Amino acid sequence: MRQAGRYLPEYRKVRRQVGGFLELCYTPDLAVEVTLQPIHRYGFDAAILFSDILVVPDALGQEVRFAEGEGPKLAPIRDVAGLAVLREEGVHDHLAPVYETVRRLSRELPPEVTLIGFAGAPWTVATYMVEGGSSRDFATTRAWSLADPEGFGRLIEIVTKATAAYLCRQVEAGAEALQLFDSWAGILPEDAFERWVIEPNSQIVSIVKQKYPQVPVIGFPRGAGVLYERYIDKTGVNAVSLDTTVPLAWAAERLQPKATLQGNLDPQVLLAGGEALERRAREIVTMLGNGPFIFNLGHGIIKETPPEHVARLLEVIRGNGRG
Ligand code: CP3
């Protein structure tokens, strides 16, 4: 959940050395350096590759840029005719620097630190491709998917195929676990959730597992609510990352017998720090720590978070915190 990023002064320093954010993702020297920064500072148990979910549309040939302080901007694809800009052939050449970053990380990380590769899930990536950036209501994406499910399905298929191959290559380069970020899964009603979240996530898991059955896959269908359970049942993921809204007792009872759970500290609580942070961190460990569990945030860290709050959180969950 952005363990490397703008809350760290050492990240901001490297970030200033490059023009665009994507340049950082495509420069192995720097991407390796920023991936390792939080590992060196905190000694986390796992490192997540430094990249972004939007390198896939970029590699497919869509124009993607990150405007300072505004988030991602893409040249939107609004209908089937718009798919003509996408080129499936050159994807892996374009992503070669990311694979190089993974290779170097797997050499440089201590063996006890797990290297996690990742990608965006097709529905979430498609929302950025269609809306041309972040969105409040995803109106264009939803309208297209409802008016022309076959045409929109073509976009999902292209992204699914590229993403599965992208993740397989990350494994070949040394990734030991994979996470699929479906950050906007939660806006979809049940039938659309089945078609645009469960189906493509299942396809990706099955393609990866066919080649690499031993590599654990963590799904993050953020906001899925009770559909987390169906997501686990149908996609074949080994673990799910819980968003901040998932009730812990329900997750322990209904989800943990079926999958490893990851999560779900509210980034706002980490930002706030103090007693509230310590109480909530202990509560999460108490409620989920009796089964397979990975402590994590429920969504991305907020950039104003004081780095000392992260250090304190680690003390508390590793049992060295007072109380
Ligand atoms: O966690 C990590 O340390 C690994 C790196 C990582 C980034 N993005 C780096 C990043 C990961 C795993 C992501 C995933 C990602 N990217 C998601 C899924 C998770 C989520 O947050 O829901 C999404 C939706 C994106 C797309 C994206 N990238 C947006 C909307 C933005 C702008 C938002 C913002 O906070 O400005 C980004 C930019 C981005 N990706 C940054 C980082 C460190 C900040 C940009 C910068 O440094 O200039």
Image: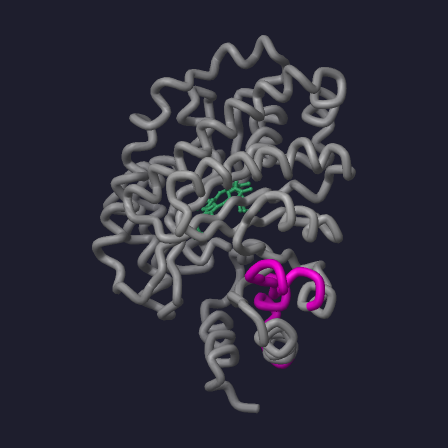
Is 290 covered by the magenta stretch?
Answer: no
Where residue 9 appears, as percent x and y from the top left, is 38, 60
**254 drawn magenta:** yes
Rendered-image quadrant of the C terminus: bottom right
Q: Nearer the viewer, residue 164 or 159?
A: 164
Taking 168 as reference, is 107 left or right? Answer: left
The residue lying at 42 percent from left, 16 percent from top is 87
Residue 137 versus residue 196: which sits nearer the camera? 196
Front-lying residue, 57 or 7: 57
Side of 281 relative to 159 (left or right): right
Q: Is residue 262 visible?
A: no
- Closest to the observer: 246 or 250? 250
In the displayed structure, would residue 151 be above or below residue 230? above
Image coordinates of residue 252 in percent, x first then y, are 67, 68
The residue at the point 62 percent across, 34 percent down is: 199
Is 71 placed above or below 311 here? above
| Residue 35 spot, x, y in % from top left | 34, 54
**Colour setup of the view:** one colour
Task: Choose top left, top right, bottom left or bottom right for residue 292.
Answer: bottom right
Can I make out residue 49 in this image?
yes
Decide: is 142 above or below 179: above
**Viewed as shown, does residue 180 lie left or right of 20?**
right
Magenta-highlighted residues: 253-275
Among the 4 quarters of the image, the one containing residue 260: bottom right
Residue for point 40% across, 26% down: 59
Q: Taking 111 as reference, is 273 left or right? A: right
